[in-house]
Structure formats: structure tokens, C-alpha cells
Image (cartoon, rainbow, N blue to C red):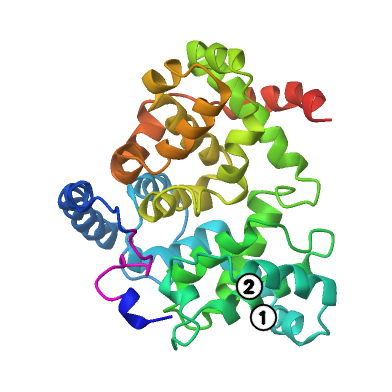
């Protein structure tokens, strides 16, 4: 692939902008967001500083919701998720998983998705570049598969690991750190999400539908009349944790909260996508219009303005008590079963 394709065309993470990229909208976003980033970096340094660890507290939780500075994300994610402690308790596990004989079926399955991972990103698409991340991506996915044999590899993992690599690639031992972040996600933060039957993901799509019924009954009933299946709308949102769905800055802001607060964050982000587009949703007249609308909304201006998006997640959505979500989840079990 020609290096010229990437010259002056990619964002800070290496994603190539399409020909119809709206520079005016993006420039409006960056002009308003850069001062926010500067303020957050300053506040983070005042409170957290350059410590080798980040511990949970009410202040740090609030700061995660306001956005972790990009330079601090690797350390913050590792410590707040619990991945760092798990890594230190198993210092040789990642290399052991790489050194063992690879399962051929697992290798073949992963290799099918490697070239499909962020083909619009120079760190994955340009195979001749020294910074190419395809090999690290393979290493982490094969190690995850060997470590979690009942899971193996599920589609969607490649996008999550790929984005983790883009965030962590400047760290020492970044492959091992991404491995432990992913292993913590699938075992501690989102258990059963990546099980082969995807039961937990399907269940949470039904939960999302019930939360929409609670928070916006008019939207819920309108979509019901269109024959909407929540699994067709939200499956990729949840299985990819919004990677390859929402703009990257917005995804990273969501993950800042996910690594601290857990899966309820995915519900809040999904509700924002739905509620932000209430008027447009209520104007749809058939199922195809609904699906086309959701494809458009996740890349729209409301999703691009990540700081506003995150503010909406916590201010516009209101309370989401864990007890109520768990009750809804139990009621939805029969639908999925």
C-alpha cells in the first residue's frame, strides 16, 4: 500500500479519512474539544500526577467520566481495571501462551479476521510499515484463545484488541499489557460476553430495549411497531464495545468509564445514541429506515462531539440503579433462553 495514501490524511490514531470527510464539522469539534483536553490534563496532573499507579476514588471516578488524558490512559486503564494486579500475579503467562503449540483451527479463524481489522488504519493496513500491528494483534488473540479455551476466538475481539493496541503501542511490553487488559475485560468486566453462544450479549440487547421502554416509551413503542429486533441494532455496539462503530475519541472516552465502572457504561452509551435521535427515529416508517438511521447516527455530529456525548451519558440519562437493571435482566432471561 502506498505511503502517499496516508500522508496528511489520517487522524492522530492512524485512521485514514474518507474522501467525503467533513473537515468543517471536524474542525468545529477540535476547536471546542482541545481546550477541554488541556484543562483535563492539567487537573489530572494536579490530582493524580505522574504516579506509577492510579487508585479508585470518588475523585478519580469523576475524572474518568470527564476523560483521562491520552498519555495517562495506559496506566489508568491497567490499574483501574485490575489488569495490572492480574499481570503481576502471572508474570510469565502471556509468553507461555505464545510458546505453546498453537491450535490450528484457532489460528485459521483468527487469520481470517486479521486483515479485516481496521483496514482504514495505517498501523494495520500498511503491512510494510515498521509500526504495523498485525503481528501483535495475532499474538494477543492467539494467547487469549489459548488462555480461555471455552471462548477461543469470537468476532469482535479483533477490533477491541486492535484499538487497545493503538492506545498502548508506545508502552514497554505493550503486547503483554494489552493481553491482560483484554483478558480482564472478558473474564472480570464483561464475563460471558464472548462465549460462543453470545448469550450475555443477546441478553443485554433485550435489557437495552427495556431501558428504552423505561426512559423513552414513545421511542420504544414506535420501534416495536416497526418490528425492530434489538439484537440487529445493538449487537455490534456491545460485542465491539463501540470500536469500529463510534468515532475513536468517543470510544476511548466510553472505555475510560468502562474500565472503572463496568458494563452499565455500555447501556448508558447505547441509550444516548437512541435518545439523541428521538425525533428522527419517530419519523421512520419501516424497519429498513430504522436500521439505516442507526447506521448514520453512530457517525453523526452528536457522536463526534465526545465531550457532549459523555455529558449526556450521565446527565441526560439520569439514574440507572444496578438493582433495577439486574431485575430487568432476570425478566429478559426467558426471551433469550
Residue drawn at the location 68% of the way across and 73% of the way down: 89
Q: Position of residue 243 (x, y in %)?
A: 50, 54
Task: Kindly check if marks 2 and 1 are in contact, taking CB atoms under 8 A apart as contact.
Answer: yes
The 10 Å Cα crowd at callout 1, few under 14, some 14 to 19, many 20 or more, is few
> Element under label 2?
helix
Q: Is residue 88 visible?
A: no
Residue 229 percent across, percent down from the top left: 65, 27
Q: Could you say which is closer to the camera, residue 59 or residue 7?
A: 7
Tell me what residue is drawn at x 54 percent, y 35 percent: 267
* 159 with respect to 6 (left or right): right
Q: Does the magenta portion include 57?
A: no
- Is residue 10 inside the magenta stretch? yes
Image position of 245 (left or right of 146): left
Above or below, comparing residue 63 to residue 53 in the picture: above
Quarter of the rendering containing residue 143: bottom right
Distance Cα–Cα, label 2 vs label 1? 6 Å
Residue 142 visible in the shown view: yes
Front residue of 49/161: it is 161
> Which contiguous range is marked in magenta?
7-18
Q: Which mark is residue 87?
A: 2
Residue located at (71% from left, 49% from top): 191
Q: Quadrant of the N terminus?
A: bottom left
Q: Residue 156: x, y in percent?
A: 63, 56
- Give the quadrant of residue 70: bottom left
Q: In the image, what residue occupies the spot 66% across and 34% down?
A: 231
**Where's the C terminus, which quadrant?**
top right
- Residue 304 screen position, x and y as percent: 32, 45
Badge 1 marks a residue whose secondary structure is loop
Residue for badge 1: 91
Amino acid at each position: 500500500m502506498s505511503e502517499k495514501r496516508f500522508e496528511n490524511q489520517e487522524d492522530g490514531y492512524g485512521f485514514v479519512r474518507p474522501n467525503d470527510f467533513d473537515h468543517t464539522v471536524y474542525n468545529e469539534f477540535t476547536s471546542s474539544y482541545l481546550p477541554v483536553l488541556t484543562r483535563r490534563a492539567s487537573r489530572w496532573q494536579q490530582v493524580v500526577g505522574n504516579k506509577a499507579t492510579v487508585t479508585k476514588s470518588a475523585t478519580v471516578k469523576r475524572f474518568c467520566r470527564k476523560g483521562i488524558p491520552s498519555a495517562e490512559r495506559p496506566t489508568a486503564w491497567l490499574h483501574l481495571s485490575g489488569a495490572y494486579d492480574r499481570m503481576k500475579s502471572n508474570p510469565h503467562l502471556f509468553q507461555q501462551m505464545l510458546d505453546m503449540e498453537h491450535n490450528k483451527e484457532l489460528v485459521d479463524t483468527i487469520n481470517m479476521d486479521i486483515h479485516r481489522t481496521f483496514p482504514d488504519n495505517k498501523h494495520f493496513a500498511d503491512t510494510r510499515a515498521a509500526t504495523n500491528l498485525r503481528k501483535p494483534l495475532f499474538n494477543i488473540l492467539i494467547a487469549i484463545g489459548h488462555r480461555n479455551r471455552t471462548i477461543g476466538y469470537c468476532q469482535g475481539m479483533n477490533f477491541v484488541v486492535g484499538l487497545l493496541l493503538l492506545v498502548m503501542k508506545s508502552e514497554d511490553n505493550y503486547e503483554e499489557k494489552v493481553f491482560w487488559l483484554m483478558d480482564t475485560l472478558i473474564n472480570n468486566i464483561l464475563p460471558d460476553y464472548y462465549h460462543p453462544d453470545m448469550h450475555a450479549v443477546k441478553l443485554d440487547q433485550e435489557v437495552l430495549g427495556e431501558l428504552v421502554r423505561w426512559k423513552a416509551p414513545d421511542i420504544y413503542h414506535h420501534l416495536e411497531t416497526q418490528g425492530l429486533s434489538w439484537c440487529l441494532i445493538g449487537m455490534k455496539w456491545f460485542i465491539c464495545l463501540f470500536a469500529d462503530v463510534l468515532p475513536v475519541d468517543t470510544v476511548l472516552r466510553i472505555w475510560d468509564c468502562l474500565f472503572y465502572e463496568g458494563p452499565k457504561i455500555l447501556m448508558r452509551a447505547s441509550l444516548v445514541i437512541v435518545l439523541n435521535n428521538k425525533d428522527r427515529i419517530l419519523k421512520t416508517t419501516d424497519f429498513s429506515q430504522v436500521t439505516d438511521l442507526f447506521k448514520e447516527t453512530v457517525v453523526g455530529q452528536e457522536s463526534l462531539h465526545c465531550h457532549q456525548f459523555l455529558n449526556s451519558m450521565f446527565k441526560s440519562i439520569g439514574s440507572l440503579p444496578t438493582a433495577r437493571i439486574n431485575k430487568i435482566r432476570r425478566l429478559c432471561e426467558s426471551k433469550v433462553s
